[in-house]
Image (cartoon, helix red, strand yellow):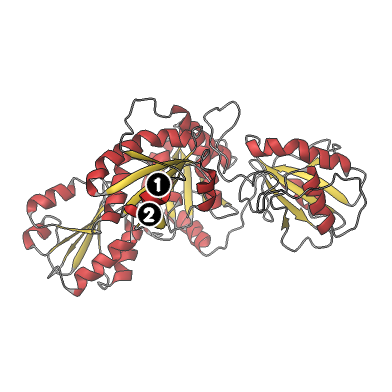
Amino acid sequence: MVRLAAVGFLALLCITLSVSAYSEDFDEKDVVVLGASNFTEVVNSHKFVLVEFYAPWCGHCQTLAPEYAKAATILKDDGAVLAKVDATVHSDLSQQFQVRGFPTLLFFVNGKQKLYNGGRKVHDIVDWVKKKCGPSVQTLKSTADAEKALEVETPIAVSYVESLEDKNAKAFAAAADKEEGVAFYLTEDKEVAAKFSLEKTPSLVLLKKQAEKVALFEGDFEEMALASFVSKNKLPLVITFSRETARSIFESDTNKQFLLFAGPEEYAKIRVTYEEAAKSFKGQIIFVLVDVANREVAAPVLEFFSLSGEKTKLMGFVPESSGLKFGYDGDFSLESVKEFGEKFVENKLDPYFKSEDIPETNDEPVKVVVGKSFEDIVLDESKDVLLEVYAPWCGHCKSLEPEYKKLAELLKDVKSIVIAKMDGTKNEHGRVTITGFPTVIFFPAGKKTEEPLSAGVYRTAAGLGKFLKENAAIPFEADLPEYVEPKNEGQAEADEPEHVEEHTDMEDSKDEL
């Protein structure tokens, strides 16, 4: 599952790149169109079905469409069906499968749902589905098979065993079932094994096109040890950040990253040190390079970390719900970088949080909160504080704004209540966890050390007023509009907080996660 802060990070990159979505012609003849009338029938009548939930206005969906169509044509002979659902038309299906963003891809095996976590290019989709449809390990029977395996672009794991039926072969196959992004091959042929410089049984080598091209397994030939070896070695020592590589970074089981912001000349000076440090933290830290000379990619990432890009900078990042960031101010000697890595792994570093400057005036009914003023305004023990965390480009935030202002105007004379807002794209605080925009949370007076309360689905002045009446620590009186319960059971009074919204119109909005 994609971590929430990481999702937002991915969005920042994709904002700039989604504008150049595919414009080429493509044929979707092999993509099955699903709706409420045929969804269950199609999913249950085919063993393997990959379903894309999309929105017509979604930039990423438009980019995915030709790749998905090509994959559908390739995979139809393998017994896999690729289908799509317009989530804006079939919202009932979206709700049933808890779709919170577009595109969302779900894989069904004999009608049972699984999350698709592969890539978005045609070869990624085909490779992922084929692996799920067929055996996770391919057998190499000849040197010709070996030559073909060596041409594969993805990393390959090759095991040489005494017999294809022995316990070592079974352990290798079990490990293969656990790992994505790697092609697994097995051989019992001595000549084939020699093509991969494997001389004894059992043995395993992992080959990839990037730096540290060869990794030899040296542990006990057991399932967990094999899987761990592949997981730690399948990624490049250093991954250059791009839209194509973002998923391998942020959907990895390794939840800590180093991000080095540097231009080509600067990186050339420290590349050896950075790669050498990466070898010491396999499986603990993913080492990433953000090429600041590539403005299309670097600009949104620099903005996310509040960096200018004027000088080489190393950051630690934990893409969990709070998206913790850690700055490095040392030199780029191997010893210093490794020391920073050790403290990062051991959670001995202090994070930093973004903040705009405190506004000179703040006399509107809705008070402006920034990272630097969070303690003084939101954590004031004498006040009940309702806080909206928003993004300037968020469509749902814009819809909420007039109702939120109305609520603030109605309560402006209630001294015990503060109605506040904070731009979540430019400000952060350790007490705020963003699960989507807008996030509306309540900090009761006298209880600031406790977890804030979520305002849930309330998105009107009446609904939020009702929420405050029920939860305010300090009772108050105000002329608030009457709240009317939704007519349909389970229906929210307004749209739920937005987790993902993708638009192609850059003037009006950007990806919302």
- Judging depth in this view, the residue of 470 and 429 nearest the camera is 470
Q: Is residue 126 above or below residue 281?
A: above
Q: In this view, does 57 lie above or below 463?
A: above
From this viewpoint, is residue 503 visible? yes
Horizontal arrangement in the rendering, residue 123 relative to residue 244 (left or right): left
Callout 2: 10 Å neighbours few (<14), some, many (20+)?
many
Location of the C terminus by quadrant is: top right
Q: In this view, does 224 lie above or below 90?
A: below
Horizontal arrangement in the rendering, residue 194 relative to residue 117 (left or right): left
Q: Where is residue 108 in the image (x, y as percent from the top left)?
A: 37, 54
Q: Where is residue 42 in the image (x, y as percent from the top left)?
A: 36, 49
Callout 1: 10 Å neighbours few (<14), some, many (20+)?
many
Residue type at mark 2: give it: Phe
Horizontal arrangement in the rendering, residue 126 relative to residue 408 (left or right): left
Q: Residue 108 carries which label?
A: 2
Q: Determine the residue located farthest toward the front in the rendered image.
A: 37
Q: Where is residue 14 in the image (x, y as percent from the top left)?
A: 48, 37
- Judging depth in this view, the residue of 302 and 442 nearest the camera is 442
Q: Position of residue 51 (x, y in %)?
A: 40, 46
Q: Which mark is residue 170?
A: none
Question: At numbered mark 1, what does the secondary structure look like: helix, strand or loop?
Answer: strand
Q: Tell me the residue that label 1 is attached to.
A: 51
Q: Do the residues labelled 1 and 2 touch (CB within 8 Å)?
A: yes
The residue lying at 86 percent from left, 39 percent from top is 409
Q: How far is mark 1 from mark 2, CA to CA?
A: 8 Å
